[in-house]
Image (cartoon, rainbow, N blue to C red):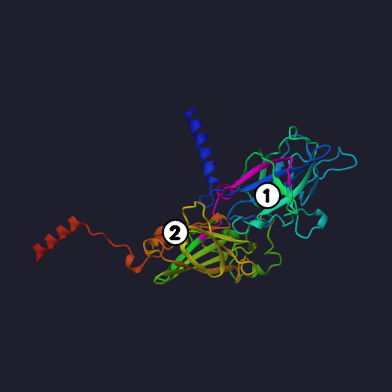
Amino acid sequence: MRLLISAICVIVLFSYAAAYDPLDPNGNITIKWDVVSWTADGYVAAVTMSNFQMYRHIMNPGWTLGWSWAKKEVIWSMVGSQTTEQGDCSKFKGNVPHCCKKTPTVVDLLPGVPYNQQFSNCCKGGVVAAWGQDPSSAVSAFQVSVGQAGTSNKTVKLPKNFTLLAPGPGYTCGPAKIVPSTTFLTTDKRRKTQALMTWNVTCTYSQFLARKNPSCCVSLSSFYNSTITPCPSCACGCQNKKNCVKGRSKFLDMVGLHTPKRDNEPLLQCTHHMCPIRVHWHVKTNYKDYWRVKIAVTNFNYRLNYSLWTLAVQHPNLNNVTQVFSFDYKPLLAYQSINDTGMFYGTKFFNDLLMEAGPSGNVQSEVLLQKNKKTFTLNQGWAFPRRVYFNGEECMMPSPDTYPYLPNSSPVNVLNFPTFIISSLLLLALW
């Protein structure tokens, strides 16, 4: 019995740890349901999805939201989204519901839908920006009219078993919880209205649940050492090595080869690391009061362009960033007293789109940092990052013992004192 209890505790603790991001401890996606009116057999609710993650966004093909109804509810209509299946509505005469499934699956509408099908913050193909990158685009919303449901605060039963794909797995959603009703400001900003009822669902991300292997890796180099530390071999797993494509292959000229698949299966360039993304950190120059780093991000996936990409880096000297030349930059103060983490992302309409693998499949920038004379050093790999995340996924770092080292800091054999004494005595005896 004790063994069973211990095992359950370990599993629970591990699941919580897996969903905890040390660089964004408060990051989550919150789904809020605001009941705005009652109907004859149910209610109309505005559903708002807010991405409070600082550097993890929802990329194309967008989010997919699911849940289970508590009773025999149906969806009469939707604005700003749609369900992927209608289900069996054969028992209805006349007006047929939009969806009769016990477990509906909802997706966002694509841009350009007719105006009467649109809702505020809808119709972006499910793409939602990270909160740290663009708060105004970190929201997606739709309206749903629910029938065969409760018609008051006491009779409404909350949906349950929420699931979120964004666009793949990795998110775990908690139960719906009733919270204080949301207040709304009228367009003239002179009057406040209030939702009739509000409940929230919180979803957190775990890279462990999303995939078995990392999706990016880090390579390192420096001006003081000609050695380049590459990404670790098979850093992202080598299961795609049989289907990879060698550079300049005629296979790349096939029509439709570059079209993304529904399951986002990659088509990778053949490399020793087999990662879709490589981040290279180069210590470029050492000045008297400053030092300069060059950062390059390379895409090895022939089937995917990365829009709204983000790069989060942890390094102690990011508390003194003087200038970032080609990227936008924002410090991430997860712990207010510690300023060692920052987010780089593309400048809008310039390099916020990382193209597919090939000549244009890279973005790069340089960063100028002011030295702290008490802590700055080029010894023992201090100039290299501690952690790197691309699009919210932690990248595989090389082993520290492979980092480029200063020429005068190469490993030195430590002299053994007793051996030295004995050797000296023998030398004197022979002399």
Frontmost residue, 302 versus 189 = 189
Q: Is residue 153 visible?
A: yes
How crowded pointer 1 is (Cα within 10 Å; few <14, some 14-19, many 20+) is rated as many
**Which of the numbered marks, if any, corresponds to residue 12?**
none
Give the spatial CA distance, label 1 vs label 2.
34 Å
Instruction: Count the labels in the image.
Output: 2
How crowded pointer 2 is (Cα within 10 Å; few <14, some 14-19, many 20+) is rated as some
Q: Is residue 198 left or right of residue 411?
A: right
Q: Is residue 275 visible?
A: no
Q: Amino acid at mark 2?
A: Pro
Picture residue at 52% right of the left edge, 52% below the top: 334
Picture residue at 55% right of the left edge, 46% below the top: 19
**Which of the numbered marks, if any, corresponds to residue 316?**
2
Magenta stretch: give its range. 192-217
**Which of the numbered marks, if any, corresponds to residue 49?**
1
Residue found at the very far front of the displayed protein:
190
- Which quarter shows the C terminus? bottom left
Frontmost residue, 270 versus 193 = 193
Frontmost residue, 13 versus 214 = 13
Residue 294 % position (x, y): 49, 69
